[in-house]
Image: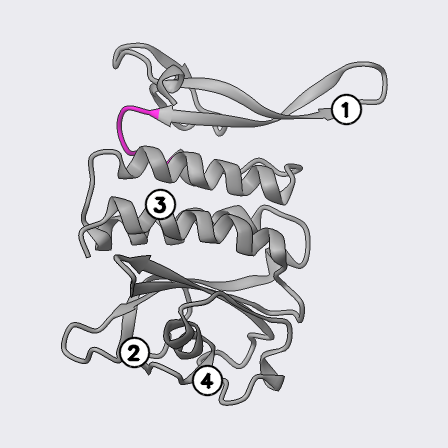
């Protein structure tokens, strides 16, 4: 990761041409043009200060490449920050914008965020930072997809939420869901929750990268 750092006074233009900031660019994806050449479709950024372009995802990258950028940016953002509110808020933004930049069904994601362990009720989750519509404020362990994942301490991928027993319909537009526990010292401290407006919106690839992200959050934050 060290090769991404640059001196503060070295600047370059961001892709949307709105900002100039201290950053080093490194190619993470190219797309073939069919004539032995290629065009750049994604940059990886490591910045020495927090910047809105961390949530910029170039169209045309694969899901794996988008998640790779999420993990890279999250690592940079967490480097000197241990507050879980701050880190989960930025992570929710990264996830939402990354998935929105991908083809369907990923771009049909309509909610991405967190529930955290409620300090006043040990077997209850309380709403954390998110991107999307207003959500349920508290969820008991064992209730709905989030509660089931928290209680079992295992990732839940639900292709059709209408078929999940006890599903909590915070948003009637949601059709599929993935929930990944964030574990710290053998205990659930939070869950990553992402909803999609179409069925079968998530698969093993989402699970793989989100579980890696959950581990990163567990280690980076003071919960």
Labels 3 and 2: the sequence-earlier one: 2
- Between circles 3 and 2, the one closer to the viewer is 3
Magenta: main secondary structure: loop
Q: Position of residue 63 (x, y in %)?
A: 61, 45
Report if the CB atoms under discs 3 and 1 are less than 8 Å apart.
no
Q: Residue 161 lies in what quarter of the image?
A: bottom right
Q: What number of labels is visible?
A: 4
- Specify the label residue 17 is tagged with: none
Left or right side of 218 for 205: right
Sort mark 2 into few (<14), some (14-19) or many (20+) by Cα contacts within 10 Å. few
* Element assignment for label 4: loop
Q: CA distance from mark 3 to mark 1?
A: 33 Å
Sort mark 4 into few (<14), some (14-19) or many (20+) by Cα contacts within 10 Å. some
Query: Relative to 51, does residue 30 appear above or below in the rendering?
Result: above
Labels 1 and 2: the sequence-earlier one: 1
Q: Which residue is mark 4?
A: 168
Residue 164 within the segment the image draws in magenta: no
Tell me the magenta residue range: 47-52
Left or right side of 172 for 160: right
Left or right side of 145 for 138: left
Report if the CB atoms under discs 3 and 2 are less than 8 Å apart.
no
Labels 3 and 1: the sequence-earlier one: 1
* Element assignment for label 1: strand
- Specify the label residue 32 is tagged with: 1
Q: Which residue is mark 3?
A: 216
């Amino acid at each position: 990761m060290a090769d991404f750092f640059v001196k503060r006074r070295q600047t370059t233009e961001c892709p949307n041409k709105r900002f100039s900031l201290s950053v080093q660019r490194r190619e993470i994806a190219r797309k073939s043009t069919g004539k032995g050449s290629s065009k750049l479709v994604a940059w990886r950024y490591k910045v020495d200060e927090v910047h809105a372009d961390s949530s910029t995802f170039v169209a045309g990258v694969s899901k794996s490449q988008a998640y790779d950028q999420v993990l890279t940016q999250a690592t940079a953002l967490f480097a000197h920050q241990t507050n879980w509110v701050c880190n989960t808020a930025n992570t929710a933004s990264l996830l939402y914008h990354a998935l929105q930049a991908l083809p369907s069904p990923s771009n049909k994601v309509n909610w991405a965020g967190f529930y955290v362990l409620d300090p006043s009720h040990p077997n209850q989750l309380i709403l954390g930072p998110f991107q999307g519509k207003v959500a349920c404020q508290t969820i008991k362990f064992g209730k709905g997809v989030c509660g089931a994942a928290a209680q079992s301490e295992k990732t839940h991928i639900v292709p059709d939420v209408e078929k999940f027993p006890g599903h909590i319909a915070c948003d009637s537009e949601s059709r599929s869901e993935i929930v990944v526990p964030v574990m710290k010292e053998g205990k659930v401290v939070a869950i990553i929750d992402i909803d999609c407006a179409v069925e079968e919106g998530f698969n093993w690839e989402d699970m793989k990268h989100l579980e890696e992200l959950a581990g990163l959050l567990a280690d980076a934050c003071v919960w």
